[in-house]
Amino acid sequence: MTDYELIRSKRRTLELRVLEDGRVQVRAPQRAPLRMVQTFVDSRRQWIRDQQQRQASRPRQRWQDGSTLVFRGQPLTLDVSPGRWSVSVSGGYLQVRVAEPDSETAVQQAVERWLREEARPLFADSIERQFGWFARQGYARPVLRVKKMRTRWGSLSAKGYINLNMALLHYPPAALDYVVMHELCHLQHMDHGPGFHALMDTRMPDWRQRKHLLDQPLYQP
Ligand SMILES: [Zn+2]
């Protein structure tokens, strides 16, 4: 019998999900009888196994001593050892000191905290270097927000925020500058029409090559 978590909701149909860690969730209408849910799960057993296998073989970032983390396009080897919290780059290594060096979660948390600290000044610097022309056109400098986003590299909000994906830290600086320039160009053109592309071509003639840098899977959460 397959183990699963049952979530009752206002929906009308049954839905099956296999999470990234392989756990199975079933969403069911409030009154669906348990026997019906169980029959449904049993009928999808092969599908569940396939999904679990696919999740398990999916390449993902590992957080152990010796694993590789790409930072700004450069591979760094994690050097994890026990100690008081500290994370720093030294040569080709990312030295991580944590109380529990054998816990991937602890290492991930330490490195993500460090990444968050690194992101702000690096992203702000990219905006600073590229904002001059927009300032001369009279645009207000958007306020930076660093975010963990699943589907977008960046966005520019009408309220004056430029949101940048923390995962940009794993890509070469040229790719970060491209995303920042793309969002800044939205100050002038909200859509992706011909005007927008003409402005990109003027401000950053090689933006297409830079954009391709983002096609590589350098970081898989
Ligand atoms: Zn856009």
Image (tube, rainbow, N blue to C red):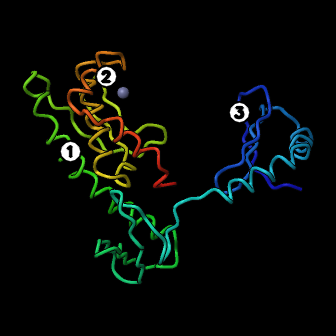
Q: Which label belongs to residue 126?
A: 1
Badge 2 vs badge 1, beta-carbon distance below 8 Å = no
Q: Is residue 21 left or right of residue 123?
A: right
Question: Mark 2 and mark 1: span between their CA atoms?
Answer: 20 Å
SS category of the residue bearing label 1: helix
Identify the image quadrant of residue 203. top left
Q: Relative to residue 122, is residue 17 depicted above or below?
A: above
The kind of residue tagged 2 is His
Q: Which residue is mark 2?
A: 197
Q: Relative to residue 77, is residue 121 depicted above or below?
A: above
Q: Is residue 115 left or right of residue 20?
A: left
SS category of the residue bearing label 3: strand
The kind of residue tagged 3 is Ser
Specify the quadrant that holds the N terminus.
bottom right
| Residue for point 37% across, 20% down | 192
Circle 3 residues within 10 Å: few <14, some 14–19, many ≥20: few
Q: Which residue is mark 3?
A: 9
x%, y% of residue 120? 24, 50
Badge 1 vs badge 3, beta-carbon distance below 8 Å = no
| Residue for point 29% across, 22% down | 158
| Residue for point 33% across, 80% down | 84
Q: Is residue 118 left or right of residue 74?
A: left
The kind of residue tagged 1 is Ser
Earlier sequence position, callout 3 versus callout 2: 3
